[in-house]
């Protein structure tokens, strides 16, 4: 277990926060940390920046993330990692498609290689990053394209050599169904599942025999095509399989 002092914490939007802290470890785009919140639990977090300092960007969705959002500069943050399989290097014309805070995972890759960015959120209040060069959609039409990010991508109609996708699994399943088959092996998805160990031992993040923490979190289109649970089923804290509900 490592620890570092928080250099900066910012509220980026509705319940969305960013924490910056120094780290001596090296990381690659797409990898994640296991962040330990004392007295509560560990949670996996994508590394949204790895230049000189680490950054994690997250939305408050439970007790652990709420506690993290209440921390201050100078407080200690505890972590393990980096873990997981990174994104492969892009080839040719590249697109990044993100839903919600999914862009946090894609940001280091985009900063390094460039490309076209598509971001979707429910409302403008949940957009934590905007840029005049980004293609942006909101479900309620309060900013940019009125609709979801997959429909935005289809409406623009550009063709790419490599596509990276990260966000809610329902959104990624929608992209897989409507766009993925056209591009096949040149599409990569970053999955988020319940994780307890982060190193492939506990099997809590398993999906059709793939361990998201160890075999992913980045998976190719071919690997995703072998997961009939993708976008359909997930495990709860107790290990019970439940159906994902479209929202």
Image (spheres, grey):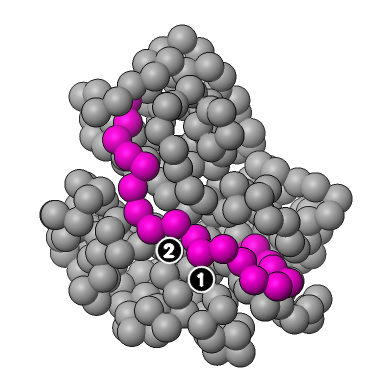
Residue 233 position, x and y percent, is 30, 73
Q: In the rendered image of this protein, does residue 109 appear above or below residue 42?
A: below
78 relative to 30 in the view: left or right = left
Query: Which mark, residue 48?
Result: none
Give residue 124's position: percent from left, percent from top.
Answer: 72, 48
Left or right: 153 as drawn, with respect to 97: right
Vertical position of residue 101 compared to residue 244: above or below: above
State which tag comes first along the sequence, 2 or 1.
1
Residue occupied by mark 2: 218
Name the residue: 53% across, 37% down.
50
Segment colored magenta: 78-97
Q: Is residue 85 magenta?
A: yes
- Secondary structure at badge 1 equals strand
Q: Is residue 84 left or right of residue 17?
A: left
Is residue 237 found inside the magenta-colored segment of the image?
A: no
Quadrant in the rendering for residue 203:
bottom left
Q: Please tell me whether residue 87 is drawn above or below residue 58 in the rendered image.
A: below
Residue 188 is marked as 1
Outermost residue, bottom side: 182
Percent from the top left, x then y, of residue 138? 70, 59
At which x and y percent is residue 199? 22, 50
Q: Residue at x 66, y 42 (%)?
A: 128
Which SS class for mark 2? strand
Crowding at label 2, few (<14), some or many (≥20) Cα neighbours within 10 Å?
Answer: many
Residue 242 visible in this rendered orientation of the protein: no
Query: In which quadrant will I find the N terminus?
Result: top left
Look at 76% across and 46% down and name the residue there: 130
Q: Is residue 238 left or right of residue 99?
A: left
Q: Are marks 2 and 1 in contact (CB under 8 Å)?
A: yes
Instruction: Give 120 or 102, whichever is nearer the viewer.
Output: 102
């Amino acid at each position: 277990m490592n620890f570092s002092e928080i250099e900066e914490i910012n509220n980026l939007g509705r319940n969305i926060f960013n924490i910056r802290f120094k780290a001596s470890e090296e990381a690659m785009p797409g990898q994640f940390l296991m962040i330990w919140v004392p007295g509560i639990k560990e949670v996996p977090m994508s590394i949204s920046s790895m230049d000189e300092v680490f950054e994690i960007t997250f939305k408050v969705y439970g007790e652990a993330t709420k506690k993290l959002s209440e921390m201050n500069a100078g407080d200690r943050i505890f972590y393990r990692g980096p873990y997981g399989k990174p994104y492969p290097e892009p080839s040719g014309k590249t697109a990044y498609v993100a839903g919600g805070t999914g862009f946090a995972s894609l940001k280091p890759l985009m900063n390094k290689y460039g490309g076209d960015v598509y971001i979707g959120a429910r409302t403008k209040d949940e957009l934590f990053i905007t840029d005049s060069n980004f293609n942006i959609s909101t479900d309620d039409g309060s900013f940019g394209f009125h609709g979801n990010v997959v429909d935005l991508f289809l409406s623009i109609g550009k063709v790419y050599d490599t596509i990276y996708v990260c966000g809610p699994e329902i959104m990624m399943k929608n992209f897989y169904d409507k766009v993925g088959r056209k591009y096949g092996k040149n599409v990569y998805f970053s999955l988020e599942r319940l994780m307890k160990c982060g190193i492939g031992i506990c099997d809590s993040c398993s999906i059709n025999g793939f361990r998201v923490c160890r075999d992913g979190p980045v998976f190719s289109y071919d690997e995703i095509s072998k997961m009939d649970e993708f976008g359909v089923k997930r495990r709860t804290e107790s290990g019970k399989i439940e159906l994902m509900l479209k929202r």
